Amino acid sequence: MNHRKSTWAALGLALAVVCTPSHAIFTNGGFEAGNTTGWTTQFYTTGPLTGAPPFTGANTQLNPVDPASLAYYNNQLDPNWVYVSRGYTWMAYQQFLDEVWNGPQNLKGQMEAKHPSRVKVVGAGFTDPQGAPLVLPRSGSNTLMLNNSSYTYSYDSGGGVMVTDTYAAASSKANTIVQSDTVTAADRDPADGKLHVRFSYAAVLDDAGHAPQDQPYFYLRVRNTTKNTVLFEDFAFASASNPDFHPIPAPTSPFSNFLYKDWTDMDIVVPDADLGDTIEVYLLAADCSQGGHSGYAYLDGFGSRRLPPPGTPDTVAPVPTVGEFGLMGLAMGLGLLGVGRLRAARRR
C-alpha cells in the first residue's frame, strides 16, 4: 500500500509540473517585474519626418546618442551634482531657482535639453503628468511610459528641508523599446483555438501647431520577423483633426495643448502557419523636431491572454501548457508508476 501511495504521489507531482502555468509570449510583457527586463531600449535625437502623410516607420529620422554623452548627461542630471557640485549650496532655494535654475544661466533648460533617460515603469498612484484621464496602470501593477515629458527633482533647501520642482521637457528626443519572442502552442486561446498576441497602448502628444513632419509622434509595430510580415502598425502625429485624439479636459500643467489617445486594446490573431515564428513588438515615441514640444506613449499587457477592462484587477492566469520540463516530469512520474506496479505484481 505504501508503494502505491508513493507512486501516485510521484505521478501527481509530475502532473503538477506539467500543469504549471508557462510564460506567455514576451518576457515581462506587462512590466510586472517593475522594470524593463526582457526589453531593449534606445535613446535618440530626432529630425523631421521625411515625405508626406500618411507616415510609416520608414519616414522617421533617428540619430543614436553615443554612450559617453549618455553617461555625462546622466551625471549632470543627478540633483546633488547640480545643486552641490556647481557651488550653489550657500543660496536660499528660491534664490537658486530665480538666479540659476530658471534664471540667466537657465540650468533647467540645460537639463531638459540633455535628459536621455525617458523610459520608466510606473505603478499604482501614478497619474499622467499632463492630466490625461488615463487609467494607470492599465493592467496589473505596472505600465511602461516611453519618452515621458516631465521630470521631478528634489533639492535640499537648507537644514535638510527638501523642495521639489517639476517641469516639462522635450528637446527633440525619441525613445524606442523592442522585444522579440517565439509564438508557441502556449499562445493558443482555448476559447477559440487560435493563436493570439494581445496588448494595450495609449499616447499623449503636444499639438505644437507645426507642419505634420515636425509634430510629436508615436509609432507602434508588431511584425513576424521570420516571414518579414507586418501584423499591426499604428503611426500618429499630434493633430486635433485625428478622431483618435482628444483634448485633455483639465490639464494639470501650464502646457495646455496636449492631446491624448485613450487605451486601445489590441487582439491580433496570428495565423497557424506562423506557429514557431518570431514576433517582434516595437514602440517609438518622439518629441517635435524643433525641440519645444514633447510626445510620449504607454504600453502594457503584452502576451497571449485576454486583458481585463481598465481599472479592474488582473486575475487571469496564464494558460497551462506542457513544456520540455513538464514532459520530463510526466515521463518520470509514469516511470515510477510502472516500477511500483511491477513490484506489486512480483509480491503477489
Image (spheres, rainbow, N blue to C red):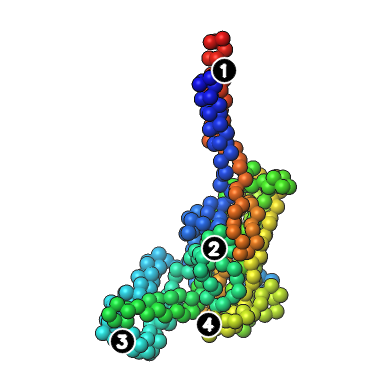
Numbered mark located on residue 253 in the image: 4
Say which residue label 1 marks.
Answer: 341
Q: CA distance from mark 4 to mark 2?
A: 22 Å
Location of the C terminus (image quadrant) = top right
Numbered mark located on residue 164 in the image: none
Q: Are marks 4 and 2 in contact (CB under 8 Å)?
A: no
The local secondary structure at tag 4 comes to loop
The local secondary structure at tag 3 comes to loop
- Let me know if residue 246 appears in the view: yes
Quarter holding residue 164: bottom left
The local secondary structure at tag 2 comes to strand
| Looking at the image, residue 347 lies above or below residue 290 | above
Classify 10 Å Cα crowding around label 1: few (below 14), some (14-19), many (20 and above): some
Q: CA distance from mark 3 to mark 2?
A: 38 Å
Q: CA distance from mark 3 to mark 4?
A: 25 Å
Amino acid type, mark 2: Thr
Residue closest to the eye, 140 or 4: 4
- Mark 1 or 4, which is nearer the eye? 1
N-terminal of the two: label 1 or label 4?
A: 4
Across and down, in percent, residue 194 comes to 71, 47
| Looking at the image, residue 305 lies above or below residue 130 | above
Numbered mark located on residue 143 in the image: 2
Say which residue label 3 marks.
Answer: 92
Amino acid type, mark 3: Ala
